[in-house]
Amino acid sequence: MFDPMKKGNAYCCLINGHWQEGSLAPVEVTRPADGGLLGTVPALSHKEVDAAFRAAKAAQKQWAETPISVRSAILHEASFLLEEKAEAIASILSQEISKDMASSLSEVKRTADFIRFTADEGKHMEGEMVGADSFPGFNKKRFSIVTRVPLGVVLAISPFNYPVNLSASKIAPALMAGNSVILKPPTSGAISALHLAAVFHEAGLPAGVLNTVTGRGSDIGDYLVTHPMVDFISFTGSTAVGKRIARQVGMVPLLLELGGKDAALVLEDADLDDAAKDIVSGAYSYSGQRCTAVKRVLALESIADALVEKIKERVLALKTGMPHEKVQVTPLINDKAADYVQELIDDAIEKGATLICGNKREKNLIYPTLFDNVTTDMRLAWEEPFGPVLPIMRIQDVEEGIDIANRSEYGLQASVFTKNIDSAFSIAERLEVGTVHINNKTERGPDHFPFLGVKSSGMGTQGIRYSIEAMSRRKVVVVNLEP
């Protein structure tokens, strides 16, 4: 397997088709599970960032002129290579972000599927002809030809929790649209993302079309997003950082995937066994470090006791440990993240929530924690923990549940559990979120579905076709057949 390394465990950045070191002291990437050093990635200076942008700008024009069939073939080759290297990359991913091996392997294989589907979908992004005669006063001798053209240089900023999948979900659509890409991966996840870049490079992507930039966000973050060569920014991360970027960039178009406080509303006629299974899976997989994790349960009082028991039984059956073990809950990404989750747990206990199980911590490993009787005066009702803790809030009626769900600053997703499809659609219409799941946990996929958030959860729509559209624009040529 090709490693984007120069020597030992010192990784390099891909700039203009070459693997390069940085001029500043490299950034250490440690394993969250034990604090051990996994490797180092370059800390690029502003001049080195400039070089990456110049390479991307220079390569983009020729890439845009490359036939779509050729772009598609390169992405298909990248998909094939990623599948071939899946086990090795998943092993690195598991160590780097403390994700269990099964989930890590699933992420890499899902990413290969994403790239392959994008390569095919891009070939169907065709233009249209619009006749003038449908508007009063015009005839058939005037018409417009509408095509899609790339935006230019796409800055892709990916998060730690899915550094392979959420990097590729930005890179692949951008490439199929004819853009060049600057990828800024997170520090925790950078090595995995560099291996992804190596796959695209090995697949035959021309020099400069994909470049990687690593370093401390405090040193290069603002410089990247305000760079004069940026034509589009796709960012996945915290709401606070997303809002900061939006304030900084002015008229540069954005695609923002931010935080969430996804609610699961459980009605009286719901299948409680199925609801409990989906809720626990949605709340605790990858230790709850997902923007689409179930982050609160709104249960009608009449079924709350029974639901709590069923959820408790499943939570107690979850296995907790290190990522190389067959477990569902692993250490959080760092101590700071664990400290924040513990703050929310302590606040809930202090204000009278009923601790059902959990509240056990070993450094940055927090055991799955479940609360009942969480009320709206508790931080856990509103703040996103990004950890393995689930609050159950009891509601008297559906109206109260909708009100609590909509009072959140976030609006990513929600779930409704009921056997009454009319009720489900009625509630779905009133929930202020991007997506409502009926009788299932909140989740991102399938990847060709539209994925979006409202309010503080994001801006713009992702999903393979939608991402390609977001990273391109319409261009109109009007043809007049007579003077």
Image (tube, grey):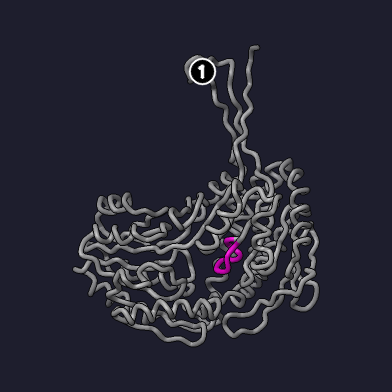
Q: Which residue is mark 1?
A: 133
Name the residue located 55 percent from the left edge and 68 percent from the top edge: 161
Name the residue located 57 percent from the left edge and 82 percent from the top edge: 33
Highlighted range, magenta: 158-166
Considering depth in this image, is 242 or 94 the residue closer to the camera?
A: 242
Extreme top residue here? 483
Mark 1 is surrounded, within 10 Å at the Cα level, by few (under 14), some (14 to 19) or many (20 or more) other residues, namely: few
Q: Position of residue 117 (x, y in %)?
A: 58, 52
The quadrant holding residue 107 is bottom right
From this viewpoint, is residue 230 visible? yes
Q: Secondary structure at mark 1?
A: loop
Q: Locate the C terminus by quadrant.
A: top right
Q: Position of residue 17 (x, y in %)?
A: 79, 58
Considering depth in this image, is 113 or 201 the residue closer to the camera?
A: 201
From this viewpoint, is residue 1 visible? no
Give left or right: position of 240 versus 13: left
Give left or right: position of 327 versus 112: left
The quadrant holding residue 48 is bottom right
Name the residue located 51 percent from the left edge and 18 percent from the top edge: 133
Name the residue located 60 percent from the left edge and 31 percent from the top edge: 146
Asked whether residue 289 is drawn in magenta, I would say no
Q: Position of residue 224 (x, y in %)?
A: 67, 58
- Secondary structure mainly formed by the magenta segment: loop
Considering depth in this image, is 203 or 21 the residue closer to the camera?
A: 21
Q: At label 1, which amino acid type do we have?
A: Asp
